[in-house]
Image (cartoon, grey):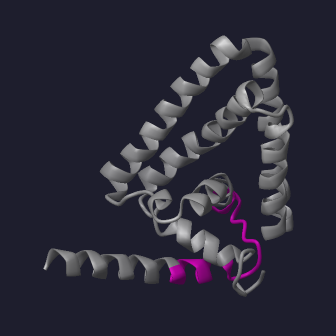
């Protein structure tokens, strides 16, 4: 998707939407720590409580396929991480069973989501992305975190100029948000 051509598979648009809600470094760090555990424990919940036995596998496949469709290289890594989470959640489900498994899910989800909201309220000073687009925020969160880490530690870009293009979009979205906020205050 070089250039961010629009549509459902527009990585620049997805990344800019999510990035506009995650500009504070402490909030980004909090997300880096807690987004993937949310994904893993959501899969654990599907393993122990879903009405059909393959729900966690379907969920994992959808996420992995979507990430690969956005960018082949980083998407393949994200899909691998999804598969590892599926395997770990399957093993946990078999070991914990329903009675203990749902308690682990509950505690982990409550703790991780609380940390996310603290990151937004205290550091970002902005509501989370899921307030404006729940599906996009939940679908993009694990991938966004991975792309952030890859960029920070390996200078990874899906294609040359990606981060510069996204930063321009994020800056525009942040300005638009600040203008709306200022207008409400006056």
Which residue is rendered at x = 29% and y = 79% of the image?
180
Magenta range = 150-169
Quarter of the image for the C terminus: give it. bottom left
- Classify residue 183 as left or right of residue 51: left
Viewer-nearest residue: 50 or 106? 50
Q: Is residue 153 magenta?
A: yes
Residue 128 in sight: yes
Viewer-nearest residue: 113 or 160? 113
Residue 71 in sight: no
Image location (x, y in percent) of residue 139: 66, 57
Image location (x, y in percent) of residue 128: 44, 57
- Classify residue 104 as left or right of residue 90: left
**Placement of 84 over or under 186, stated as above or below:** above
Image location (x, y in percent) of residue 58: 84, 45
Image location (x, y in percent) of residue 98: 70, 16
Q: Main secondary structure of the magenta part?
A: helix
Q: Residue furthest front?
A: 51
Q: Residue furthest left?
A: 186
Which residue is rendered at x = 45% and y = 45% of the image?
116
Q: Is residue 163 magenta?
A: yes
Which residue is rendered at x = 35% and y = 60% of the image?
126
- Residue 101 quadrant: top right
**Placement of 48 over or under 4, stated as above or below:** above
């Amino acid at each position: 998707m070089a250039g961010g051509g629009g549509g459902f598979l527009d990585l620049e648009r997805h990344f800019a939407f999510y990035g506009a809600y995650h500009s504070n470094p402490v909030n980004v760090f909090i997300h880096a720590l807690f987004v993937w555990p949310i994904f893993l424990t959501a899969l654990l919940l599907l393993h122990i409580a879903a009405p059909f036995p393959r729900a966690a596998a379907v969920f994992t496949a959808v996420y992995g396929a979507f990430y690969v469709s956005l960018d082949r290289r980083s998407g393949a890594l994200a899909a691998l991480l999804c598969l590892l989470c599926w395997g770990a959640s399957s093993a946990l489900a078999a070991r914990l069973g329903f009675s203990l498994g749902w308690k682990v899910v509950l505690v982990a989800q409550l703790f991780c989501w609380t940390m996310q909201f603290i990151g937004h309220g205290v550091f970002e000073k902005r509501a989370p992305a899921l307030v404006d687009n729940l599906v996009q925020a939940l679908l993009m969160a694990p991938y966004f975190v991975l792309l952030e880490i890859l960029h920070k530690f390996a200078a990874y870009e899906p294609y040359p100029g990606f981060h510069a293009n996204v930063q321009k979009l994020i800056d525009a979205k942040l300005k638009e948000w600040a203008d709306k906020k200022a207008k409400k205050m006056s």
